[in-house]
Amino acid sequence: MDAIAERYSHQLSQNILRGMDYNTQNAMFNGYKGSGAAWAGAGERKSTS
């Protein structure tokens, strides 16, 4: 059972990377890079300064 889960995880990772690469090559959106701020949770933003 562990081998099946490991194989599934590896295939999923490869599919995600392939999709992100495709999006990059076609000037599509891959998600937010982030602002560099640490999140405290529950909608509260913690300053990094």
Image (tube, grey):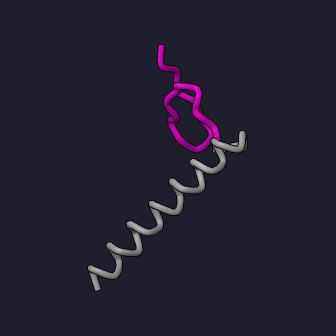
Magenta part, dominant SS: loop
Q: Residue at x 52, y 21 (%)?
A: 47
Residue 20 is situated, as x and y percent measured from the top left of the image, at 58, 50
Q: What span is colored magenta in the figure?
A: 31-49
Asked if 29 appears above or below 33 in the picture, the reply is: below
Q: Which residue lies furthest to the left in this view?
A: 2
Is 45 in front, or is 8? 8
Q: Which residue is drawn at 58% across and 32% down?
A: 34
Quarter of the figure with residue 3: bottom left
Quarter of the figure with residue 26: top right
Is 12 in front, or is 2? 12
Residue 23 is situated, as x and y percent measured from the top left of the image, at 66, 47
Q: Residue furthest front?
A: 25
Residue 36 is situated, as x and y percent measured from the top left of the image, at 52, 25
Whether the magenta-drawn stretch holds residue 28 is answered as no
| Side (left or right) of 31 relative to 9 | right
Q: Which residue lies furthest to the top in this view?
A: 49
Is 37 in front, or is 43? 37
Residue 13 is situated, as x and y percent measured from the top left of the image, at 45, 61
Q: Which residue is drawn at 59% across and 56% down?
A: 19
| Side (left or right) of 40 relative to 10 | right
Whether the magenta-drawn stretch holds residue 47 is answered as yes
Q: Residue at x 58, y 44 (%)?
A: 42
Asked if 17 appears above or below 33 in the picture, the reply is: below
Which image quarter is the N terminus in? bottom left
Quarter of the figure with residue 8: bottom left
Label count reads 0
| Side (left or right) of 13 relative to 19 | left
